[in-house]
Image (tube, rainbow, N blue to C red):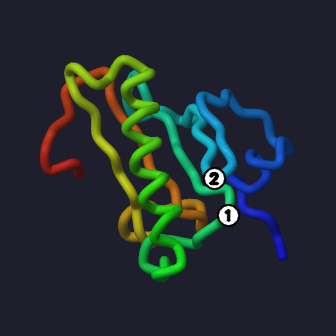
């Protein structure tokens, strides 16, 4: 099976600016940032997308969100706020079939997002 872009980053086959890592998740800067701070946080054990997550993935998903909040705080986003985005499928803008959460901040966000 072919590895996703994110699996190659996790395996250090593709360089990336890593912000945080533990045994479950990896956080790194997005190469095409949509905000002054744009970090992706991904589970190391790939889940294709949120709609494919199962009950067995519950602890990974919870860890992903808790760590996203901690990473956002470490990046100085806690005070003014930030946005967490999980895209599901091509119409939502998902371009890599590996569940990931965008941490966006450093500027005011608009609603609806687009």
Asked which quadrant contains residue 62, the reply is bottom left
Q: In this view, does 50 lie to the left or right of 112?
A: right
Q: In this view, does 92 lie to the left or right of 5?
A: left
Q: Which of marks 2 and 1 is nearer the N terminus?
A: 2
Query: Badge 1, how many Cα within 10 Å: few under 14, some, many 20+?
Result: some
Q: Do the residues labelled 2 and 1 touch (CB within 8 Å)?
A: yes
Residue at the (36%, 35%) spot, across then down: 104
Name the spot of residue 31 as percent of width and height, x first.
Answer: 59, 34
Asked which quadrant contains residue 27, the reply is top right
Residue at the (33%, 46%) spot, across then down: 84
Q: Name the residue under label 2.
A: 24
Q: Label 2, label 1: how many angstroms apart (C-alpha)?
A: 7 Å
Query: Badge 2, how many Cα within 10 Å: few under 14, some, many 20+?
Result: some
Instruction: Give the mark toward the camera: 2 or 1.
Output: 2
Q: Mark 1 points at which residue?
A: 45
Name the spot of residue 2 as percent of width and height, x first.
Answer: 82, 70
Name the spot of residue 78 as percent of width and height, x first.
Answer: 28, 25
Residue at the (60%, 56%) spot, across then down: 43
Image height check: is 90 above or below 25? below
Image height check: is 108 above or below 43? above
- Closer to us: 79 or 5: 79
User: Element at badge 2?
Assistant: loop
Q: In this view, does 62 lie to the left or right of 97?
A: left
Image height check: is 105 above or below 96? above
Q: Is residue 3 left or right of residue 34?
A: right
User: Element at badge 1?
Assistant: loop
Name the spot of residue 109 as percent of width and height, x first.
Answer: 20, 34
Image height check: is 54 above or below 44? below
């Amino acid at each position: 099976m072919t590895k996703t872009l994110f699996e190659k980053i996790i395996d250090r086959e593709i360089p990336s600016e890593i912000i945080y890592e533990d045994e479950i998740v990896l956080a790194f800067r997005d190469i095409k940032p949509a905000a002054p701070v744009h970090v992706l946080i991904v589970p190391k054990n790939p889940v294709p997308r949120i709609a494919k997550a199962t009950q067995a993935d519950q602890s990974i998903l919870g860890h992903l969100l808790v760590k996203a909040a901690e990473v956002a705080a470490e990046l100085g986003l806690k005070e003014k706020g930030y946005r967490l985005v999980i895209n599901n499928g091509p119409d939502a803008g998902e371009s890599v079939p590996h569940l990931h959460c965008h941490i966006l901040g450093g500027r005011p966000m608009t609603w609806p997002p687009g």
